[in-house]
Image: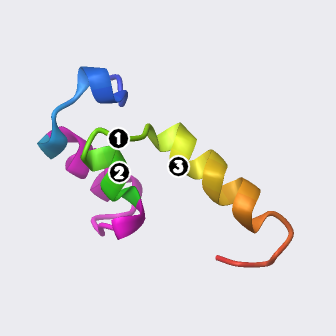
Amino acid sequence: MSILIKDTTPMERIAIVKEALDGEYDEFYDDYVAGKKEIAELNREYSEKNAGTGSD
């Protein structure tokens, strides 16, 4: 199953996020659910911003 925006609906994207987060939802993924940014892009931006900071 593809998790790309082009292959999923907003409801499916919410389910994908919840499944990855053990049933929880994190607002961090709002841009993915809205179809603005892919998960990989969000995760890359987070890693670049927080690399070496010890942030969770």
* Residue drawn where x is 35% and y is 51% of the image: 31
Give the quarter of the image for residue 35: top left
Q: In this view, does 1 lie above or below 20?
A: above
Number of numbered labels in the structure image: 3
On the rendered structure, is 38 left or right of 7?
right
Marks 3 and 1, how far apart at CA: 10 Å
On the rendered structure, is 24 left or right of 48?
left
Can you tell which mark lies on residue 31? 2
Q: Do the residues labelled 1 and 2 touch (CB within 8 Å)?
A: yes
Marks 1 and 2, how far apart at CA: 5 Å
Given residues 2 and 55, the one toward you in this image is 55
Given residues 51 and 23, the one toward you in this image is 51
Amino acid carrying label 3: it is Leu
* Residue drawn where x is 30% and y is 67% of the image: 25
Q: Are marks 2 and 3 in contact (CB under 8 Å)?
A: yes
Q: Where is residue 33 in the image (x, y as percent from the top left)?
A: 27, 47
The residue singled out by tag 1 in the image is: 36
Q: Is residue 21 magenta?
A: yes
Going from the N terminus, do you reach mark 3 or mark 1 first? 1
Q: Position of residue 44 (x, y in %)?
A: 65, 46
Q: Does the magenta stretch include residue 31?
A: no
Identify the element where label 1 is drawn: loop
Amino acid carrying label 1: it is Lys
